[in-house]
Amino acid sequence: MLKRYSKLTRAEFILYLREPSGFFFTLIFPLLLMMLFGSIWGNEPFPGENFGYIDFAVSAFIGMVILTTGISGLTTSIAAYREKGILRRFKAAPISPLLVLMAELSSLFVITIMGMLLLLAAGVFVFGMHFYGSIPEVVLAFVLSTLSISALGFIPASLAPTARSGMIISNVMYFPMLFLSGAALPREMLPPFLQTFSQILPLTHAIELLQGLWLGGHLWDYPVQITVLCGVMVVGFVIAAKFFRWE
């Protein structure tokens, strides 16, 4: 089983990197946005604060990477396999749905780490980015956020019959979270009613958690965010495992 899992994971990883749009929007687009906004606002400390724009916003751009892999990448990939009959062939082989889902999740997790490392490297070497938190706590928050958003993406991925329908569903989920959660623009720029609405979006809580920990907070300071992300993760994986369709 372990051998089949590793082969599936490796194959999914290579296939994702060979897809130009997936490669660009996961690894390049968030980096370009950070470079653009960083060149405009720099990283000089805000008045009365010890952190600048890049220190504050890098967590949001990491959230964008998590969103892209967990929603767009996962949903369209699984739906395309279903449409092409690839999942049906897996069904005839000694491969369980759990193994397929875990291999897909693992490959996307590695790609998410790559996107995060690119952002961190640019932040440090281009903008002199600072870090004020605890590395183990940020790593735990990153893993939790990635699993939570991926679990959310598994729900439409398990049900969408075609790649086109999967793309439509993923876009409906992707763009509200992209623009309202603080990933593309600071939530403070939104009208009050949209700031309130954004609290129902899991990515909002992921970014709040990552930003807080990055700037010196601790996990126990964010019980609401952690509870929401854990709840989304459990519900998403349970629904995906129960309703996963081969065809």
Image (cartoon, rainbow, N blue to C red):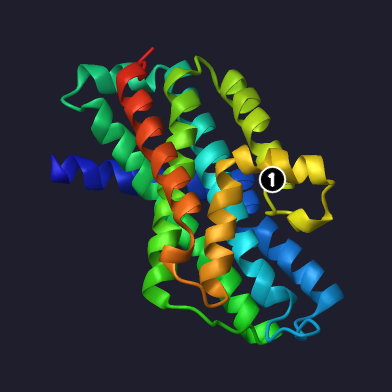
**As drawn, 97 above or below 149:** above
Observer-nearest of 90 and 138: 138
Residue 82: where, in percent of width, then height?
43, 19
Q: Which residue is mark 1?
A: 178
Question: Looking at the image, which residue is at 68% across and 42% down?
Answer: 198
Whether residue 160 is visible to the viewer of this picture, yes or no, is yes
Instruction: Identify which amino acid the numbered label 1 is placed on.
Output: Leu
Whether residue 15 is visible to the viewer of this picture, yes or no, is no
Question: Is 214 left, or right, of 142 in this rendering?
Answer: right
Question: Is 218 left, or right, of 115 in this rendering?
Answer: left
**As drawn, 211 above or below 72:** below
In the structure shown, which secondary structural element does the residue marked by tag 1 occupy? helix
Question: Looking at the image, which residue is at 53% across and 78% down?
Answer: 216
Q: Quadrant of residue 59?
A: bottom right
Question: Looking at the image, which residue is at 78% across and 57% down?
Answer: 188
Residue 165: where, in percent of width, then height?
60, 18
Quadrant housing the C terminus? top left
> Mark 1: few, some, or many residues within 10 Å (few <14, many ≥20)?
many
> What is the residue that sits farthest to the left in this orientation?
1
**As drawn, 133 above or below 100:** below
Question: Looking at the image, which residue is at 50% across and 14% down?
Answer: 161
Q: Quadrant of residue 110?
A: bottom left
**As drawn, 110 above or below 150:** below
Residue 148: where, in percent of width, then height?
44, 44
Residue 67: where, in percent of width, then height?
57, 46
